[in-house]
């Protein structure tokens, strides 16, 4: 039996290394929920209205998202983080305004989420990135 020679980097020299790491592919439902969240009004979108727009019950939506090892709240958080990053790339907004735009009922909830996303408080982030 012939063995192929393995280079020092651990890859078989006859095959190129993969371009990018393999990620779990998302189900069609999870992908559609993300599309709805990224394109919609985050202050108004709730799990039950998203489920209705997809033509399924809230229970079915939860079950399908769970099959992808995720949940609506996690996807909503990622959409809020993405939207926040997009807004702050173009202009600085007061935290109260941004919190409202992202669908937070309490400004402090937004500030806690922002610290979780960036590791910085909102004011620290402003000093670091706008100085």
Image (tube, helix red, strand yellow):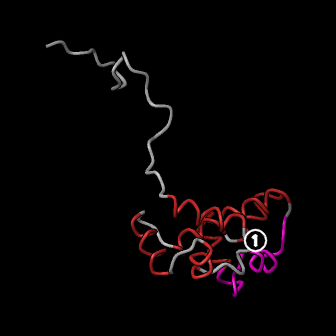
- The quarter of the picture where residue 45 lies is bottom right
**The one of 106 and 30 positioned closer to us in this rendering:** 30
x and y percentages locating residue 44 in the rendered image: 71, 81
Q: Which quadrant holds the N terminus?
A: top left
**The one of 37 and 18 positioned closer to us in this rendering:** 37
Give above or below for 19 relative to 81.
above
x and y percentages locating residue 11 in the rendered image: 35, 24
x and y percentages locating residue 114 in the rendered image: 65, 71
Left or right, residue 11 beside residue 18: left
- Going 72% across and 84% down the picture, which residue do you hit? 107
Q: Which quadrant holds the C terminus?
A: bottom right
- Going 77% across and 76% down the picture, which residue do you hit? 101
- Going 36% across and 16% down the picture, which residue do you hit? 13
x and y percentages locating residue 113 in the rendered image: 62, 74
Q: Residue furthest left?
A: 1
The residue beneath circle 1 is 123
Left or right, residue 27 beside residue 48: left
Give above or below for 129 relative to 79.
above
Q: Mark 1: few, some, or many residues within 10 Å (few <14, many ≥20)?
A: few
**The one of 116 and 46 positioned closer to us in this rendering:** 46
- The quarter of the picture where residue 34 lies is bottom right
Name the secondary structure under disc 1: helix
Magenta segment boundaries in residue numbering: 92-109
């Amino acid at each position: 039996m012939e063995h192929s020679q393995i280079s020092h980097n651990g890859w078989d020299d006859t095959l190129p290394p993969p371009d990018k790491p393999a990620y779990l592919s998302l189900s069609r439902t999870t992908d559609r929920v993300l599309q709805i969240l990224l394109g919609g009004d985050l202050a108004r979108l709730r799990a039950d209205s998203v489920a209705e727009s997809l033509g399924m019950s809230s229970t079915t939506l939860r079950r399908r998202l769970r099959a992808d090892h995720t949940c609506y709240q996690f996807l909503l958080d990622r959409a809020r983080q993405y939207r926040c990053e997009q807004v702050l790339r173009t202009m600085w907004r007061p935290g109260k305004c941004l919190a409202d735009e992202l669908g937070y009922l309490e400004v402090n909830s937004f500030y806690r989420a922002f610290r979780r996303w960036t590791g910085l408080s909102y004011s620290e982030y402003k000093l670091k990135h706008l100085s």
